[in-house]
Amino acid sequence: MYKITAFSDKELRLVDKSEEILQNSGKDIYATFMNQKKTLISLAVLVSKTPSLKSRKRYGLNKRDIKTMSNTIIQFSTSNPLLLPTRAIMGRSFILSKINFFYFLLKVISDYKTDSVLVNEIQNTCNSLVFSLMAEETYEAIIKNNVTHRKFKQIASDELAHLWEFRMDRNLDSFSPPLMALWKERCNLIPVLGTLQGTSEILKLSINLSETWGKFLSSAPGNAGLESALEEFVFGLKHEEIKHLRSRMKSLKIPAVNREQSIEILKKDKIYEEKHKIFINGDAREIYSFFQMRLGNTVKREIKNTEGPRQTIEELFLIYLLNQKKSILPGVIKKSISRVFSDA
């Protein structure tokens, strides 16, 4: 049985520092903090006690292990919770509870203004936890999407099954850093729109990212799905809104638009980023909401068979990463992934 720990060493240091501050904050806040901490530790213990996907136990004539779980994910995706292992469901509850716990810490410690370094470290931890949840959901999106090649669904399902087994102790070490870096840079990007070519936005987004991102962008020239998914990501607008804006610019002979003009043309109260203030406070929960909005739109287009991206830029980027040499994959899954590549 693989033991899930409630906190990493780094997280535990932040929790201990916060506890020292909150001990003198009053009984109510300190009691709430201690109760939430104990609950999270108990939840980690419960997740650890759920049946392991590595157990290879047999129930009747059926064998169950990570391989069979991966095959089940491929066949039924993750849409039906009745087909998911208890470890996956409990693990999701654990990570959500952990996110809420650290956001609670962020709020109460920020109110005391005693240690700005501690506040920044807690904020970074909050962001990392939310981004890890987004990475997990990106894997799920790849598996659910009918556009995805089966080879990549198989690799993603292997990854997801191992994530469910090891949860935060595994941390998606090979793939979450590029995704997290992308989301972090997006927090700092304010689209200017202009000619709607996106050149300025993409340059600003890419300047601090690794060459992997640049290679990804240049890997599929002329790929309309990638280009439209990237436009949604950098402009913060739906494909349909971007298309409408371009049409109006052409009919009105407007060479460029600013944010105020686009709001008027689209008859929107505010552009998404302004409404949710993701550029003001860098809150990863708003980037998560932004991701969910775009992901939901890809599903709607698939159902209605309408024009526009059928995959988010995160899905496409992760698929690109999955297609790289298997040497970059975590050691814990090299054997299973090597099998997938040899069968491809």
Image: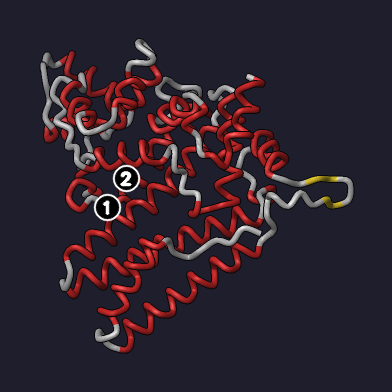
Dot 2 and dot 1 residues touching (CB under 8 Å) = yes
Q: Quadrant of residue 243?
A: top left
- Position of 310 compared to 144: left or right? left
How crowded pointer 2 is (Cα within 10 Å; few <14, some 14-19, many 20+) is rated as many
Considering every residue shown, the one lying at the far top of the view is 222
Q: Residues within 10 Å of mark 1 (few under 14, many from 20)?
A: some
Which of the 4 quarters of the picture holds residue 32? bottom left
Q: Is 46 displayed left or right of 282 in the figure? A: right
Residue at (44% x, 49% y) in the render: 133
Marks 2 and 1, how far apart at CA: 7 Å
Kindly indicate the quadrant of the structure image that contains residue 134: top left
Question: Element type at marker 2?
Answer: helix
Residue denoted by label 1: 283
Instruction: Answer whether residue 281 is visible to the viewer in this image.
Output: yes
Q: Which quadrant would the N terminus be assigned to in this image?
A: bottom right
Viewer-proximal residue among 86 and 166: 166
Residue 42 relative to residue 106: left or right: right
Q: Amino acid at mark 2?
A: Ile
Q: Please give the residue where the numbered disc 2 appears in the rendered image.
A: 287
Seen in the picture, residue 313 relative to 22 is either above or below; the reply is above
Residue 123's spot in the image, x, y percent? 27, 58
Vertical placement of 60 versus 235: above or below?
A: below
Q: Picture coordinates of residue 246 (x, y %)? A: 22, 19
Q: What residue lies at 38% left-to-right and 14% top-to-bottom?
A: 220
Colour logic? secondary structure
Q: Position of residue 177 (x, y in %)?
A: 37, 40
In percent of width and height, residue 187 lies at 24, 43
| Residue drawn at x 19%, y 37% as measured from the top left | 189
Q: Nearer the viewer, residue 22 or 256?
A: 22
